[in-house]
Amino acid sequence: MASGSSGDSATTRAASDRAALAGERASAMAGSNGGAALRVGDAFFSYGDYGPAAELYRAALQKGAPDPNLVNLRLGAALALAGARVEAETAFRAVTGPRAELARLWLLWLSSPHA
């Protein structure tokens, strides 16, 4: 096996997947499915594109995502990592149920000096 060949194909695949996200984003924003908006938001988040991820998470909430606590947790994370501290705190404070403890950990992280 040639050195780097599997890495090259993975890089090519990732670039192709990332390029397709623009179309998926438009479709998710225009559609009525909160689950689709969440899925595409997760894809943007995985690439470190926190602004578009947050936009899609907000859309997922508006479109009736099946688990609003999960969406608010991910929205808060995207906003926190994008530097939107106050908005992130609001999203984390909206999380209830079993995910609330994780939201509180994020709130602690936001209050730390390195955040």
Image (tube, helix red, strand yellow):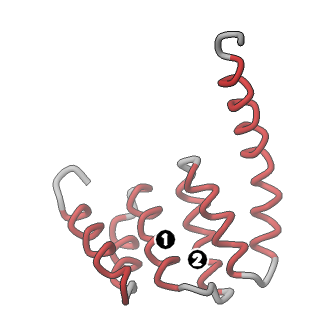
* Label 1 vs 2, first from the N-terminus: 2
Amino acid type, callout 2: Arg
Using the image, determine if residue 86 lies above or below residue 16. Answer: below
* Viewer-nearest residue: 114 or 11: 11
Residue 59 spot, x, y in % from top left: 64, 78
Mark drawn on residue 75: 1
Res 4 → quadrant: top right
Please report the residue visible at 28 percent of the width from the left and 78 percent of the height from the top: 101
Disc 1/disc 2 C-alpha distance (Å): 7 Å
User: Label for residue 33?
Assistant: none
Q: Position of residue 7 (x, y in %)?
A: 65, 24
* Kind of residue sitting beneath label 1: Leu
For label 1, the SS is helix
Give left or right: position of 47 versus 24: left
Mark 2 — residue?
Answer: 58
Q: Say which residue appears at 44% left-offset and 56% top-offset.
A: 82
Along the line of sight, the residue nearer the viewer: 83 or 102: 102
Residue drawn 36% across the image and 77% down it: 92
